[in-house]
Image: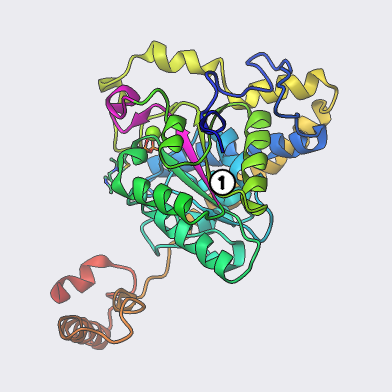
Amino acid sequence: MISDDLLPRETPVQLIDEHGTAVSDPRYAPPSTERLVEAYRALVQGRRVNDQCSALVRQGRLAVYPSSHGQEACQVAAALALGDDDWLFPTYRDSVAVIARSVDPAQSLVLLRGDWHSGYDPKEFHVAPQATPLATQLLHAVGFAHAATLRGEPTVVLAMCGDGATSEGDFHEAMNFAAVFHVPVVFFVQNNEFAISVPLSRQTAAPSLAHKAIGYGMPGERVDGNDVAALLAVLDTAVERARSGGGPSLVEAHTYRMQAHTNADDDTRYRAREAVQAWVERDPLTRMQAHLRGAGAIDDEAEAVFAAEAEQVATALREAMNAEPELDPEDLFRFVYAERTPQLESQWRMLRDELDRAAMAGTTAGATSPGATEGAR
Ligand SMILES: Cc1ncc(C[n+]2csc(CCOP(=O)(O)OP(=O)(O)O)c2C)c(N)n1
Ligand SMILES: [Mg+2]
């Protein structure tokens, strides 16, 4: 392959502009209207889930929620570009993508509630557990996709990460291995311009994150990350390329983190309100709404149906999160080692002793109260 084919274009691919007007592109055909309506429906739901989760944090029902408010087009396209047998490797910010792969929202939030590492069965949904350590999931994704190839399976893996994660050593190792071994993986970088308080300008001196691809010998592409049509077209191409033996590629989506990193972050300390406001104009929902309305593909009735559906999802999520979880303190000692280490064995005995004494004293200590395990620490 000549190196020009590996370089991203100067400007990100766009098929629908900020006002909802279609833009033609010589290399990418627009997705069908039917597919765009399906995507818009998922966008409406994704936005509602994001905002519901942020409210649940304020109510103390979720420990933390890294919102993808404003990045829903990336989330939805990542899920819709994959076939049922393909796999998604998401990060902590990708709950909406996980939900768009049919995982129950309440199950997808178990990690962020501080309960189990993964509330869903990865094998059932073909979605890996959401990774909090940056870029580690990229290595898992590459190993997983390589194994599928060795087994002769047609699986494609889409691995998500943020702009900040591209500075990690794991990103380099995953990209290099994938290119050398021609692994069927799509690296999907959501460049939302910030890694907590660190702006992109302090993250890299490369012309773009997609330019990193050529250094490994794989193609890089840049796409408007708030244009779900362009995202679907570009990701479809990358997935197809991987499936047909063309190897890995990197897609950089240009988007913006509209809210603070998480509820634990105060973004007024490091960025101007005007900068955030400028991105409201580029909202992925309003542009797709304007486009589909203009094309006569959705009307008030369809919008009302989508809004009602999203409301139902939010209600079910609130109800699930308002129920107190039933915790078994002994779970702390299960499922990590096949055989406990001597230290864990002695800690577990202390806990057992504590629980037995609490039970004899007629209290329910330990069942729901973290304080009950104090003596075992
Ligand atoms: C290996 C590792 N180092 C540091 C952190 C702390 N950390 C959590 S999120 C984050 C910023 C990540 O930024 P980016 O990759 O752009 O993703 P975004 O949060 O913007 O989606 C950092 C440094 C971590 N989780 N893992
Ligand atoms: Mg970021």
Rendered image quadrant of residue 199: top left
Image x and y of residue 148, in percent:
57, 66
Task: Look at 43% across and 65% down and name the residue there.
Answer: 325
Q: Residue lying farthest right?
A: 296
Q: How is the image coloured?
A: rainbow
* Front residue (pair 337, 137): 137
Image position of 245 with respect to 222: above or below:
below
Ligand 2 lies in quarter: top left
Image x and y of residue 338, in percent:
33, 84
- Residue 63 visible (yes or no): no
Q: Is residue 194 magenta?
A: yes
Q: Residue lying farthest top?
A: 274
| Magenta-drawn segment | 185-205
Residue 203 as seen in the image, left or right of residue 375: right
Task: Look at 40% across and 11% down and name the residue there.
Answer: 274
**Residue that badge 1 annotates:** 97
Residue 292 as seen in the image, left or right of residue 331: right
Q: Residues within 10 Å of mark 1 (few under 14, many from 20)?
A: many
